[in-house]
Amino acid sequence: MMKRSIILNYLGASLLLLAASACVDEQYTSIPVDGATDSALAEGTFVVDYAVSDGKDSRAVIGDELAANKQIRSLLYLLYDSENMLVKERVIPDINEETTWPLLRATMTWEQREALKDTLDVNSSYTAVFIANADKALFGDTQTEVLAGKENLSTLVLKLPQTPFADNNMYYFWSGAISYEKPDDAISEDSRDNPVSENIVLRRLVSRIDMEQMEITGEVIKEGFGHRFDNLLEEGIKQQLGELIDKLEGENPDATFLENCETLKTLLINKIGSKDETSTLLGGTYTGFINTLLEVCRTADTDELKNPYNAQTALWSNFKTAELKFKGMHNTLSLESLTSSYVAPADGESPTLPTSYVYDLNEGKATWIGFADEGTLADGQLPSMILQGITLSGSTTDGTTGDETGTDTETDGETNTGEGASGTDNQNTVSLNLNFSDTPVTISKNGRKTYICNPIGEISPKELGEKETYTDTYEFTVKMSKYYRSLEDLLTLENGFAFDDDTSGDDTSGDDTSGDDTSGDDTSDDDTSGDDTSGDDTSGDDTSGDDTSTEPQNTKTDFMNAVSEVFGGWGSTSEGSVLFTISIPGVGQFSYQATLEETKPQGDGSSDDAGNTGNDVGAGGDDTSAGEGAVVP
């Protein structure tokens, strides 16, 4: 007897379906063999026996693995000719919670054995299709047909139901070519004596996403700051240095003094350094800056209107439901190509297919089940389904009494409130929206992906309005000599400073040596005539100041003293330091963006491609013969 196994490469749930026998009640459109029996087959026909089973270890299952009779609740058989036109349609009977699995000849119903046996034309080729759980009754009283385009295989599609999938109504599918070939061990030349056995392995068509919240620690928050606050510190330090130099310039209006002030300002700002260089002013103060931001960001405040961080990082286990939000959630699956897509409503029409699903949270874990497509994308091309965010909703009890206010919190920090109950344990109605950067979703049929969500993965300072300012500050003291050396080493000609030398030029004698020792003799002959003046009486005191000997106006010592006074001693002593005050965001002036990181499901070392895991339960051995038709796991 010829035996052929055609296994569709999608992973399914654990259960067994099985049947064999003659065909009745088929809806024919082109093959006039209705009512044929094993004892009176028409010439030129053959019998095909379908043994139906399912693979194990579904990755789309929501809860504990259900028994087979609870997972498969309807089964439809469709047969297409070589032109892809529908020639037979048959509902396999008695598929319900009373069905005994696996289906053995001793326990299956006669109607099932009849329905899973067909008589076909030996000179024709066909495509057989089995679809499980495509009965609209499985999805509520208002559900419209979920299977469409049956007349032609090229138009055959499944649509998403209005209600979310559960473990007992997910779609399953198998498709394969059917034709007659005389087996090598044929007992007769007559095709009627050589039945064909087809082993059908149903595969789940839907895919799954799991999402959990990342544990929020101080290090996680610091990573969330990223580089987005670096500019605040750098610009704040530059501004503070500029203000200190402005104060220094007010000490002396001398042009050279002012030029030296500008030189010092340029030098200090240019050598501010980077956050990664702890030997520089920016790097040496960066850690304290981040720690201050951390403290302000997570300031405990029962009023979430003031600090949205509290709502943003609320434990997901406090919520009841989760809704993953997609741009163009796939709603239609082609059963010819097995590719899914988003079909938009016609212009002006409201969507008739769901755009998202709401699932109950399971111990803080969010789940989504629906159509997804692995696909092959050209360079730079994105898949049509984009994961954009998640909305968590439900109630939480905080264990206190009195009036409380629940929050509906957006990621931009804005909230809406609703009053809670008074005088009892507070039931706060909470709805939290977390938005991600657009995340392309590609998952194989019956594939599964797991994400870790960091609700504060990207933290930014809130953009200020025209008259707004940041309301908190980062204050720190600096010993300037630690980052810029001593003033003696800094204020040099090589660094662009210019000073009047106290001992330079012809007038180096100054007050101490003018007149009596040398000046009198040198200048008396030049400035006066013998009898009228004497070197001892007039030449020293009267003319040296006015004519040739002036006080230095801009000495290095004077400039060092002025700088030291403005910059708190420049750090020349253990107490010498200058105070810096940098404006930073206050409570409620932080913006948050959630981020996702894909991980493997715990205990699952396989990829998201379901494929054939080796656990498939198909028809095998003598149990699958046309005479018995039994499938045993």
Image (spheres, helix red, strand yellow):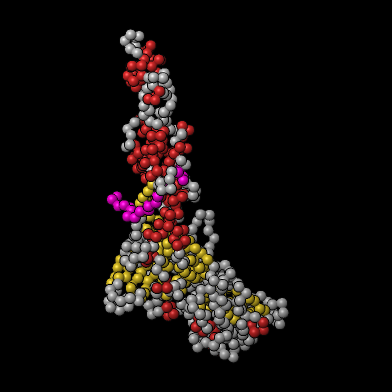
Residue 404 location, quadrant:
bottom left
Against 141, is 446 above or below? above
Q: Is residue 4 left or right of residue 57?
A: right
Residue displayed at 29% across by 50% down: 466
* Residue 262 visible in the snapshot: no
Classify the position of the N terminus by image quarter.
Answer: bottom right
Residue displayed at 49% across by 86% down: 97
Residue displayed at 32% across by 62% down: 306
Classify the position of the C terminus by image quarter.
Answer: bottom right
Against 604, is 456 above or below? above
Residue 314, percent from left and from top:
39, 68
Residue displayed at 39% across by 41% down: 564
Residue 250, percent from left and from top:
32, 37
Residue stretch in magenta: 464-484
Residue 240, percent from left and from top:
37, 45
Against 121, is 519 above or below? above
Most foreground residue, 162 or 493: 493
Most foreground residue, 179 or 226: 226
Q: Residue furthest bottom?
A: 106
* Residue 364 magenta: no
Residue 41, percent from left and from top:
61, 84
